[in-house]
Image (cartoon, rainbow, N blue to C red):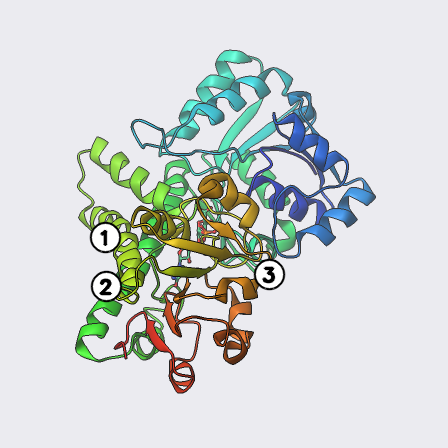
Amino acid sequence: MKIAIVGTGYVGLPSGVGFATLKHNVVCIDKDQEKIRALQSGNVTLYENGMEELFGQVVKKGNLKFTTSFEGVKDADVVILAVGTPPHPKTKEADMRYIYAAAEELAPFLSGYTVIADKSTVPVGTGDEVEKIIRQKNPNADFDVVSLPEFLREGYAIHDFFNPDRIVVGADSKRACDVIKELYKSFEEKTQILFVSRKSAETVKYASNAFLAMKIHYINEMADFCEKSGADIGQVAKGMGLDKRIGNKFLNAGPGYGGSCFPKDTTAMALMAQKYGVKMGLIETTIAGNKARKIKMAERIFDIVKDIKNPKIGVLGLAFKNGTDDVRESPAVEIISAMLEKGADITAFDYQATDNAKKVLLDKIKYAHALEDVFDDADVVAVLTEWEEFKALNIEKLASKMRHKRMVDLRNLFDGQYLRTLGFVYDAIGCVKN
Ligand code: UGA
C-alpha cells in the first residue's frame, strides 16, 4: 500500500520505518526542512532502540522517502497524521493547530479514495473537525477519517510497533475499516484488531494513558507508606503484580512520571472532562501528586547532605526514562532545577539525553563526558533515570572517587545491602533509609 505520514517525531518516524519494513511504500512529510534534509541524507533524527538499522535497510530499498511537500499524499491509500499535540501554552488543553494545519494543507492533494488516519493524541471529536476541514478545502475529495490511536512507548517504539498488545481502529465506515485491515494484514494472526467508533478510539488513548499514570502514582504513594511502615515497595509490587487482574507492569515506584505524554494527556483528559461537566477526581489527584512529588524528591536529595555546605551532587540520568534521548517533562530535569534553586553544584551524566538536556538546563550544571566524572568529589550521587546500564557499574571503584559515600536511588536500581557493606548511606524509594 502507499502510505503518507505527516510528522516525523517519536510517533511518525518509527511508524514510517515500521510500515516500510512491512513492505509498504511510505513517504514521510514534515515542514521542518532541516529535519527532512537530514533524513534524506540518511541521518536518523531521533534515538530509538533498533531503528537506525531498519531505517538504513528500508531507505536503501526505496520503501521510505522524505519530503517537505504535501504533494507526498498524492495517490496515498492511507494518510497518517502524526503531528504533535503539545499542551496549549495558556489553556493547557491539547493544542490542535498542527493537526488542523495538516488537514488543510493535505486536502488539495487527495486523489482517489483515501483514509486519513489520526495517530496523534487528540481530544474526542477531533475526527469530526478534521473531516469538516478537508471537506471545506476539497469538496470533491473521496475520503474517510479514522482514529488510529498510538500506544508506542518512546525508546521501545520499534519493538512495540511489531509487537502491539492491540490495534484500536475508530472508524464509522466499512470502506475505511477494510483499508485499515489491509494496512495491518500482517498483524491479523497475532494481535487483536479492535474496531470501535471514532469517538471511542479517541477516548481509549486518553483513558489508557491516564490509567497508567494513575497506576504509577498509586505505587508511588504506596512507596511513601512503605517508607514509614517498614515494608518494602519492591516486595509489595511483586506481590500485587502476580494478581493477573492488577498485572505486574507499571508498578515501579520512582520520582514520578514524566515524558511528553502522561503529563500532557492527564491534564488534557481532566480539562476535556470538565468541558463535559464531568469531574475526574482520580486524574486530578494524580496530576497534582505527581507534580508535588518531584519537588519532594529534590528535598530528599538535599536532606541527605544537609550537614554539608554547598554540597557537590552527582546525577545519573537526565532522560525522562531509560532508552530515550528525550527530556521533555523529565523528572530528572525538574528535580535538578529545584536543586539548582537551593544552590547545588551539579554534575550529570546520561547515555543519550545530554544534548537535549543542554538545551534546557544550559550551563547551569556540568555535563560529564564520562560517567565516572559524576562521582568525582561528590557528596551524594542521585539516580534519576532507570538506565539498566547503571546496574552494571563497578560501584566499589567509583565510590573511592567520592567525598562522601551517599546515594539517593530514586529508581531503586542498586542493591542497598551491598552498598551499605561498602559504607554507603543509601536511600531508595519505598524502603526504610539506613
Ligand atoms: C506512554 C505510554 O506508555 C505509551 O503507551 C503511549 O503510546 C505514549 O505514552 C504516548 O502517548 O505516546 P512513554 O511516554 O514513551 O509512553 O513512556 P512510558 O514508558 O509510559 O513512561 C512514562 C513515565 O512513567 C516515565 O517517566 C517512566 O520512568 C515512568 N514510569 C513508568 C514509572 O515511574 N514507573 C513505571 O512502572 C513505569
Q: Is mark 2 within 8 Å of ligand 1?
A: no
Residue placed under numbered mark 2 in the picture = 221
| Label 3 environment density (alpha carbons within 10 Å; few <14, some 14–19, many ≥20) | few
Tell me what residue is drawn at x 54 percent, y 40 percent. Answer: 177
Image quadrant of ligand 1 equals bottom left
Q: Which residue is mark 1?
A: 289
Where is residue 410 shown, x and y percent of the image?
36, 65
- Amino acid at pointer 1: Gly
Task: Point out the tag, 1 or 3, that comes first from the N-terminus.
Answer: 1
User: Residue at (54%, 53%) from the top-left corner?
Assistant: 324
Is 245 rendered above or below residue 65?
A: below
Camera-near label (1 vs 3) is: 3
Left or right: residue 266 versus residue 155 is left
The kind of residue tagged 3 is Ala
- Kindly state the secondary structure of the residue where label 2 is placed: helix
Give the x, y percent position of residue 123: 36, 34
Residues at badges 1 and 2 in contact (C-beta under 8 Å)? yes
Q: Which mark is residue 370?
A: 3
- What secondary structure is marked by label 3? loop
Near-viewer residue (144 or 267): 267
